[in-house]
Amino acid sequence: MAEKILPFRKEKVLEAIKKYPTPFHIYDERAIRQNARHFLKAFGILEGFKQFFAVKATPNPYILKIMQQEGFGLDCSSFSELVMAERMGFEGEEIMFSSNDTPAEDFVKAKELGAIINLDDISHIEFLEKAAELPNLICFRYNPGPARKGNPIIGKPEEAKYGLTREQMIEAYKITKAKGVKRFGMHTMIVSNELNEDYFIETAKMMFELAVEVYKKTGIKMEFINLGGGIGIAQKPEEEPVSYDRIARGVKKAYEEIIVKNKLHPTRIFTECGRVITGPYGYLITKVRHLKHIYRDYVGTDASMANFMRPALYGAYHHITVLGKENAPKNHVYDVTGSLCENNDKFAINRNLPEIIPGDILIIHDTGAHGFAMGFNYNGKLRSAELLLRSDGSITRIRRAENVEDYFATLDFASAKKFK
Ligand SMILES: *Cc1c(COP(=O)(O)O)cnc(C)c1O
């Protein structure tokens, strides 16, 4: 069981709220660092292993700094994320660029930074050549199609827009080898928020077998195999967190049975996890504004799906703690909502919770990845602040909240007024 315990006492949250108005996301630095070390220790049994943190999960410079200090590279998916990596001092092969439907300028930037470029389609070989010339090292993303089941967030691989087919993979390596590319990698990512450890081991086997096939058909030895992200987190109290050790041991066994046996050792193993690195260590703190009793009982908070959209977008369960009522009986049933004019703006539906009154503080769990980052401005909602609970117990604001002028910054009221 994943205990849904809080890294802070009630007084600490109240102290933060006095200084920084709700809503805000707060991340637990100590837990993120401990988790990152645990991750590297487990996967460290794989020679040459490297983890690239998926920037899109939590694109904040302080978080990226922590990743850098813990020895992670970055996985970027867009121009802005590449610039963010650059500004934080990441360079060269510390950066993996895994994008899709990619603009030319993004390839140019990735090439300029010397990032590892991961191509999502066979047609991108020519596209990249035109935009920026081919790099020395190239990687392709594999989509196994009906050979694998996939999972609810990404969907079935055969219905997912990502990657190359098996035949295209072989072809793509042949083409790029003929064009003078010298170093090669291989990538896949076919599940998201997956808790089944065996799935990742199966994926590793699939990739190792493909590497053998590519070798036999093209003579190319993979320098690395990137198993992508997608490791899930235990969001429901009854779920078990994944065991990094179990995945790493399974991958190592498959490596020995397939890569070593076929004399393709050494091939480095990469991952580009986001969610499992920071997800469980972030919390959205929001204050209850209104209680409303109609056909159901509604708790109206000062946050909305503009601050955190996973429950509305995926129907994801995110645990909610009512601050100071952790041990009170959960004898009320509520829909916990935001203030958008949008009926799926709900953090929880028919959730058993203790009795709630206006002014109560709700803590929404597991918002440390794909949380703030997925925010938006619909209904003129402003993005919140992000705070970091430091290892020494102090609190640092790592992003200020937006104000109305930020929201208007791209508009020109003066011209609009004169417009006829
Ligand atoms: C989103 C994404 C990741 C990170 O996924 P998590 O589920 O956060 O681990 C890694 N690689 C690619 C290509 C992605 O699109």
Image (cartoon, rainbow, N blue to C red):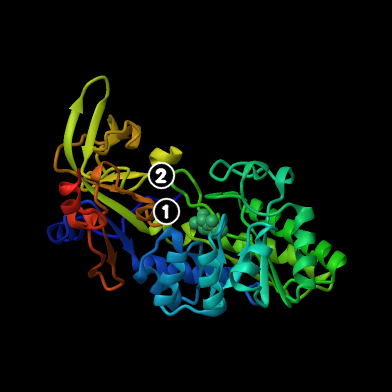
Whether pointer 1 and pointer 2 mark residues with C-beta atoms closer than 8 Å, the reply is yes
Q: Which residue is label 1 attached to?
A: 370
Disc ID at residue 56: none
Above or below: residue 414 compared with residue 353? below
In the picture, residue 327 is in which quadrant? top left
Residue at 53% in and 69% down: 52
The picture places residue 404, in percent across and down from the top left corner, at 18, 53
Indicate the position of residue 171 as horizontal and vertical percent values. 79, 60
Give whichever of 93, 114 is nearer the camera.
114
Q: Earlier in the sequence, mark 1 or mark 2?
A: 2
Determine whether the beta carbon of the residue marked 1 sits less than 8 angstroms from the nearest atom of ligand 1. Answer: yes
Q: Residues within 10 Å of mark 1 (few under 14, many from 20)?
A: many
The disc labelled 2 sits on which kind of residue? Arg
> Which residue is pictured at 12% across the width and 58% down the height?
18
Taking depth in this image into account, of 419 and 278 the one nearest to the observer is 419
Distance, label 1 to label 2, CA atoms, is 8 Å
Say which element carries label 2. helix
Query: Residue 117: x, y in percent?
Result: 60, 69
